[in-house]
Image: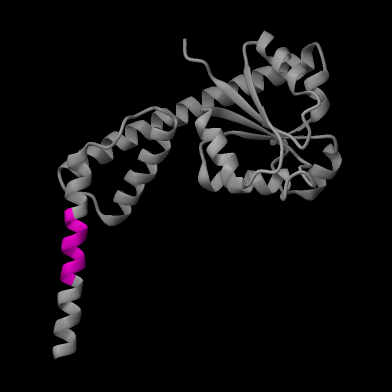
Amino acid sequence: MQEEYIGYIDNEETNFQTYTKRLKRKGILLKCRNGNISKEQVVEWLVQNEIKCFLVDYRLKPEFSYEGTDLLFYLRRILPDLPCIILTNYTEDSLKDNLVEDYLIFDRAILDKIGTDFDTFIESLKKCIQVFNQRMQLRIRRYEQLCILKKEAELNEKEYEEFLSHFNLLKSYGYIDDIPTELLDSEVENKIDRLLESVDKLLQEKKG
Protein backbone atom coordinates (compact mmCIF):
# COMPACT_ATOMS: atom_id res chain seq x y z
CA MET A 1 0.00 0.00 0.00
CA GLN A 2 1.34 3.41 -0.99
CA GLU A 3 2.16 5.72 1.92
CA GLU A 4 0.31 9.03 1.77
CA TYR A 5 1.59 12.09 3.56
CA ILE A 6 0.08 15.22 5.04
CA GLY A 7 2.36 18.22 5.44
CA TYR A 8 2.46 20.70 8.30
CA ILE A 9 4.30 24.03 8.47
CA ASP A 10 4.49 26.00 11.69
CA ASN A 11 6.60 28.82 13.07
CA GLU A 12 7.78 26.52 15.86
CA GLU A 13 8.41 22.81 16.15
CA THR A 14 7.61 22.28 19.82
CA ASN A 15 4.83 19.75 19.23
CA PHE A 16 5.89 18.25 15.91
CA GLN A 17 6.90 14.91 17.38
CA THR A 18 3.71 14.60 19.44
CA TYR A 19 1.47 15.43 16.49
CA THR A 20 3.34 13.01 14.24
CA LYS A 21 2.83 10.15 16.71
CA ARG A 22 -0.85 10.97 17.33
CA LEU A 23 -1.74 11.11 13.66
CA LYS A 24 0.25 7.98 12.84
CA ARG A 25 -1.90 6.04 15.31
CA LYS A 26 -4.88 7.18 13.23
CA GLY A 27 -3.29 6.04 9.98
CA ILE A 28 -2.00 9.43 8.85
CA LEU A 29 1.66 10.09 8.08
CA LEU A 30 2.68 13.64 8.96
CA LYS A 31 5.73 15.49 7.68
CA CYS A 32 6.56 18.74 9.46
CA ARG A 33 8.64 21.77 8.57
CA ASN A 34 9.54 25.07 10.20
CA GLY A 35 12.16 27.78 9.71
CA ASN A 36 12.59 30.67 7.34
CA ILE A 37 12.13 29.18 3.88
CA SER A 38 10.73 30.89 0.81
CA LYS A 39 7.36 30.06 -0.74
CA GLU A 40 9.20 28.50 -3.67
CA GLN A 41 11.09 26.24 -1.25
CA VAL A 42 7.80 25.27 0.39
CA VAL A 43 6.46 24.14 -3.00
CA GLU A 44 9.64 22.14 -3.61
CA TRP A 45 9.34 20.53 -0.16
CA LEU A 46 5.67 19.65 -0.72
CA VAL A 47 6.31 18.05 -4.10
CA GLN A 48 9.46 16.19 -3.07
CA ASN A 49 7.59 14.66 -0.13
CA GLU A 50 4.47 13.96 -2.21
CA ILE A 51 2.24 15.84 0.24
CA LYS A 52 -1.47 15.34 -0.45
CA CYS A 53 -2.94 17.66 2.16
CA PHE A 54 -1.27 20.64 3.80
CA LEU A 55 -1.74 22.13 7.28
CA VAL A 56 -0.56 25.73 7.57
CA ASP A 57 -0.21 27.75 10.75
CA TYR A 58 -2.07 31.06 10.54
CA ARG A 59 0.74 33.01 12.23
CA LEU A 60 4.09 32.22 10.61
CA LYS A 61 5.88 35.51 11.21
CA PRO A 62 8.46 36.44 12.39
CA GLU A 63 10.11 33.05 11.76
CA PHE A 64 8.81 33.23 8.18
CA SER A 65 8.66 36.28 5.91
CA TYR A 66 4.94 35.69 5.21
CA GLU A 67 1.77 34.59 6.98
CA GLY A 68 -0.11 31.34 6.49
CA THR A 69 -2.83 32.94 4.37
CA ASP A 70 -0.19 34.43 2.04
CA LEU A 71 1.26 30.97 1.52
CA LEU A 72 -2.17 29.46 0.95
CA PHE A 73 -2.98 31.94 -1.84
CA TYR A 74 0.40 31.26 -3.46
CA LEU A 75 -0.11 27.50 -3.34
CA ARG A 76 -3.55 27.75 -4.90
CA ARG A 77 -1.88 29.15 -8.00
CA ILE A 78 1.09 26.75 -8.13
CA LEU A 79 -0.51 23.56 -6.76
CA PRO A 80 -4.24 24.07 -7.35
CA ASP A 81 -5.15 20.46 -6.54
CA LEU A 82 -3.55 20.45 -3.08
CA PRO A 83 -6.10 20.77 -0.22
CA CYS A 84 -4.85 23.32 2.35
CA ILE A 85 -6.11 23.87 5.90
CA ILE A 86 -5.32 26.81 8.18
CA LEU A 87 -4.60 25.98 11.83
CA THR A 88 -4.74 28.86 14.28
CA ASN A 89 -4.86 29.89 17.91
CA TYR A 90 -6.74 32.98 16.75
CA THR A 91 -9.86 31.42 15.24
CA GLU A 92 -12.05 34.51 15.67
CA ASP A 93 -9.41 36.78 14.11
CA SER A 94 -9.00 34.35 11.22
CA LEU A 95 -12.73 34.34 10.54
CA LYS A 96 -13.01 38.13 10.80
CA ASP A 97 -10.23 38.58 8.25
CA ASN A 98 -12.42 36.90 5.61
CA LEU A 99 -9.29 35.76 3.78
CA VAL A 100 -9.99 32.02 3.92
CA GLU A 101 -13.21 30.02 3.69
CA ASP A 102 -14.56 29.13 7.14
CA TYR A 103 -14.49 25.38 6.51
CA LEU A 104 -10.72 25.54 5.87
CA ILE A 105 -9.97 27.04 9.30
CA PHE A 106 -9.50 24.84 12.37
CA ASP A 107 -8.58 25.73 15.93
CA ARG A 108 -5.02 24.53 16.41
CA ALA A 109 -6.07 22.99 19.72
CA ILE A 110 -7.81 20.26 17.70
CA LEU A 111 -4.44 18.50 17.42
CA ASP A 112 -4.35 18.09 21.21
CA LYS A 113 -7.94 16.97 21.72
CA ILE A 114 -9.30 13.47 22.20
CA GLY A 115 -12.66 11.96 21.43
CA THR A 116 -15.21 12.87 18.78
CA ASP A 117 -13.75 16.26 17.82
CA PHE A 118 -10.33 14.81 17.09
CA ASP A 119 -11.79 11.82 15.22
CA THR A 120 -13.89 14.16 13.07
CA PHE A 121 -10.77 16.19 12.25
CA ILE A 122 -8.92 13.01 11.28
CA GLU A 123 -11.75 12.04 8.94
CA SER A 124 -11.53 15.51 7.37
CA LEU A 125 -7.83 14.98 6.70
CA LYS A 126 -8.43 11.56 5.16
CA LYS A 127 -11.16 13.08 2.99
CA CYS A 128 -8.68 15.71 1.80
CA ILE A 129 -6.29 12.96 0.70
CA GLN A 130 -9.13 11.28 -1.20
CA VAL A 131 -9.96 14.59 -2.89
CA PHE A 132 -6.32 15.07 -3.92
CA ASN A 133 -6.12 11.55 -5.35
CA GLN A 134 -9.35 12.03 -7.28
CA ARG A 135 -8.12 15.34 -8.70
CA MET A 136 -4.92 13.64 -9.80
CA GLN A 137 -6.90 10.95 -11.59
CA LEU A 138 -8.84 13.63 -13.48
CA ARG A 139 -5.58 15.36 -14.33
CA ILE A 140 -4.07 12.07 -15.57
CA ARG A 141 -7.06 11.45 -17.84
CA ARG A 142 -6.82 14.94 -19.27
CA TYR A 143 -3.07 14.54 -19.77
CA GLU A 144 -3.65 11.28 -21.65
CA GLN A 145 -6.19 13.03 -23.91
CA LEU A 146 -3.68 15.79 -24.63
CA CYS A 147 -0.98 13.19 -25.37
CA ILE A 148 -3.18 11.67 -28.06
CA LEU A 149 -3.83 15.09 -29.58
CA LYS A 150 -0.12 15.85 -29.38
CA LYS A 151 0.78 12.69 -31.28
CA GLU A 152 -1.71 13.66 -33.94
CA ALA A 153 -0.25 17.19 -34.09
CA GLU A 154 -3.61 18.68 -33.18
CA LEU A 155 -2.63 20.69 -30.10
CA ASN A 156 -2.97 24.44 -30.25
CA GLU A 157 -0.65 26.66 -28.24
CA LYS A 158 -2.99 26.93 -25.25
CA GLU A 159 -3.48 23.16 -25.14
CA TYR A 160 0.27 22.63 -25.32
CA GLU A 161 0.75 24.86 -22.28
CA GLU A 162 -1.94 22.82 -20.52
CA PHE A 163 -0.15 19.62 -21.59
CA LEU A 164 3.13 20.81 -20.02
CA SER A 165 1.37 22.01 -16.88
CA HIS A 166 -0.22 18.59 -16.33
CA PHE A 167 3.07 16.87 -17.09
CA ASN A 168 5.09 18.96 -14.62
CA LEU A 169 2.70 18.34 -11.74
CA LEU A 170 2.08 14.66 -12.44
CA LYS A 171 5.78 13.92 -12.88
CA SER A 172 6.65 15.80 -9.68
CA TYR A 173 4.27 13.56 -7.74
CA GLY A 174 5.56 10.44 -9.48
CA TYR A 175 2.38 9.63 -11.41
CA ILE A 176 4.08 9.62 -14.81
CA ASP A 177 7.56 9.29 -16.30
CA ASP A 178 9.31 11.66 -18.69
CA ILE A 179 7.51 12.89 -21.79
CA PRO A 180 8.30 10.60 -24.74
CA THR A 181 11.06 12.22 -26.79
CA GLU A 182 9.03 12.17 -29.98
CA LEU A 183 6.37 14.36 -28.39
CA LEU A 184 8.85 17.02 -27.44
CA ASP A 185 10.92 16.85 -30.62
CA SER A 186 7.99 17.54 -32.92
CA GLU A 187 6.88 20.47 -30.81
CA VAL A 188 10.36 21.94 -30.76
CA GLU A 189 10.53 21.63 -34.53
CA ASN A 190 7.13 23.27 -34.89
CA LYS A 191 8.17 26.14 -32.66
CA ILE A 192 11.35 26.65 -34.63
CA ASP A 193 9.35 26.62 -37.87
CA ARG A 194 6.94 29.20 -36.48
CA LEU A 195 9.84 31.35 -35.33
CA LEU A 196 11.50 31.20 -38.74
CA GLU A 197 8.21 32.05 -40.41
CA SER A 198 7.84 35.08 -38.15
CA VAL A 199 11.38 36.22 -38.95
CA ASP A 200 10.78 35.78 -42.70
CA LYS A 201 7.55 37.73 -42.48
CA LEU A 202 9.25 40.53 -40.57
CA LEU A 203 12.06 40.72 -43.16
CA GLN A 204 9.55 40.81 -46.01
CA GLU A 205 7.65 43.65 -44.33
CA LYS A 206 10.86 45.64 -43.94
CA LYS A 207 11.77 45.08 -47.59
CA GLY A 208 8.32 46.20 -48.63
Task: State which region is magenta.
Answer: 189-197
Who's the residue at 51% across and 34% down the image?
Answer: 47
User: How many marks do you count on the picture?
Assistant: 0
Q: Is residue 23 left or right of residue 190?
A: right
Q: Position of residue 43 (x, y in %)?
A: 55, 40
Which image quadrant is residue 20 in?
A: top right
Would you say the magenta stretch is mainly helix, strand or loop? helix
Which image quadrant is residue 56 in?
A: top right
Q: Is residue 23 left or right of residue 46?
A: right
For residue 87, above or below residue 94: above
Quarter the C terminus occupies: bottom left
Who's the residue at 34% across and 45% down the image?
Answer: 164
Who's the residue at 59% across and 22% down the image?
Answer: 127
Who's the residue at 85% across and 39% down the image?
Answer: 90
Q: Position of residue 81 (x, y in %)?
A: 51, 36
Q: Is residue 196 left or right of residue 36?
A: left
Q: Position of residue 108 (x, y in %)?
A: 80, 29
